[in-house]
Image: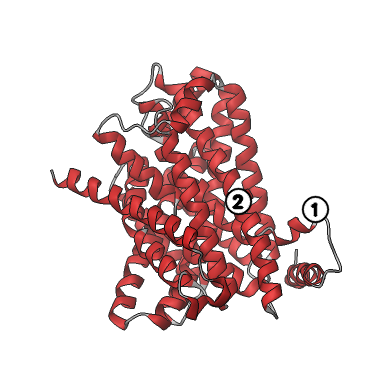
Amino acid sequence: MDAETRAGLSRRTETEIRAVLAGRRRGISTLLLFAGPALIASIAYMDPGNFATNIQAGARYNYQLLWVVLLANLIAMLFQALSAKLGLATGRNLAEMCRLHLPRPLVYGMWGVSEVAAMATDLAEFLGGAIALALLCHIPLLAGMAVTGVLTYLMLVLGGRGFRPMELMIGGLILVIAVCYILELFITPVNWGAAAVGTVLPRLPDAEALTIAVGIIGATVMPHALYLHSSLTQHRVVPHSEAERRTLLRFSNREVVIALSIAGLVNMAMVMTAAGAFHAGHSDVADIETAYHTLSPLLGPAAAGVFLVSLMASGLSSSTVGTMAGQAIMQGFAGFSIPVWIRRMVTMIPAFIVVALGVNATHALVMSQVVLSFALPVPMVALVVFTRRRDIMGPFANSRAINIGAISGAGAILALNIVLLIQTLG
């Protein structure tokens, strides 16, 4: 697909959306026109960091931490909807709003924390794709990392002109991940009754379960996704009136619910697959490579192959989206951007250092998710502050119920982080 075709695809999509806004087009098919921003953001909820934490959760604690996955996904839905609303209502993204409305020292601090979060995010995503490629093609991990870096750069270039090509590419990879985990549920013996209980009954069996729970939240509610979603909605289709904004917001909320419901079900399937495959006799399985090598003798090579394909699709798509988010963060906070290839190289460096030092790749993945959980309150609190202000949001300011839900969600994550910090410090 050449550059002109990619740009034309986006223009046609925008024209058709304008027809919907004008009332000239209706029907269920119109939902597909608005599918894009939440779809791209949702890949952050199915990245390799989720694979790592979900494998550990299922292998060690069976189905007992499924409630954490559900809680994290519900919080994610609320905050992704707020991020999209901020972009649609103000025409600016979250990082730009921070730069415009907050004191300069605070902005620099938030920028620093957000850049660390972006690097931790890319560490997980980049390593996950490299691990899958290395295992699938029987090549060294460093070689897998190099190939993954080239592939993600090519995806960024292909989707670099117009919004629609990137949306379609990421949507296709999400479909691959979802189909893979549907197949895994058919292959793996799942105790559906225990899974149902684990989904609705909150339990933290021990201190290690708390660490994994915080990792699950850090892997699910992603700081860079909150910044990125507001950026994706602000330029896709610019509304010309309050009525158009309301229509766009209505479709955006529907897309958030659908896209993140798919992501949540995929995450729950990951935990259930790990529980069904490993908990009974291999509860010590704690990393992606061991999971792959254990799956083959337990459930056959098909299960192991499907697992790797889903991991590779996750790594490629989420690493691409992570680079896009890093650009949005830098451009919003600092007011400038850098060439995408430089951004891609900078965020790859920590992953290469980790592997060169001989650090266990999956352990690095899980720790990166804990880092993300500590960085998460920064964009969450900013979103709550901005979206509740009527002078910024106008008629789109949060209702009392939304404010209570958002503050409760941010408070729950802050409380978990404080408990984990106290536990870590002994």
Residue visible at 44% across and 65% down in the picture: 345
Which mark sits nearer the N-terminus, 1 or 2? 1
Q: Decide if residue 24 is in sight here.
A: yes
Residue visible at 52% across and 59% down in the picture: 80
Q: Which residue is mark 2?
A: 257
| SS of the residue under disc 2 | helix
Instruction: Establish if 145 lies above or below 201.
Output: below
Q: Which residue is mark 1?
A: 28
Q: Residues within 10 Å of mark 2 (few under 14, many from 20)?
A: some
Instruction: Establish if 34 lies above or below 242.
Output: above
Residue visible at 67% across and 49% down in the picture: 172
Camera-nearest residue between 101 and 162? 101
Residue 363 percent coordinates (x, y): 33, 41
| SS of the residue under disc 1 | loop
13 vs 88, left or right, is right
Residue 140 percent coordinates (x, y): 44, 42
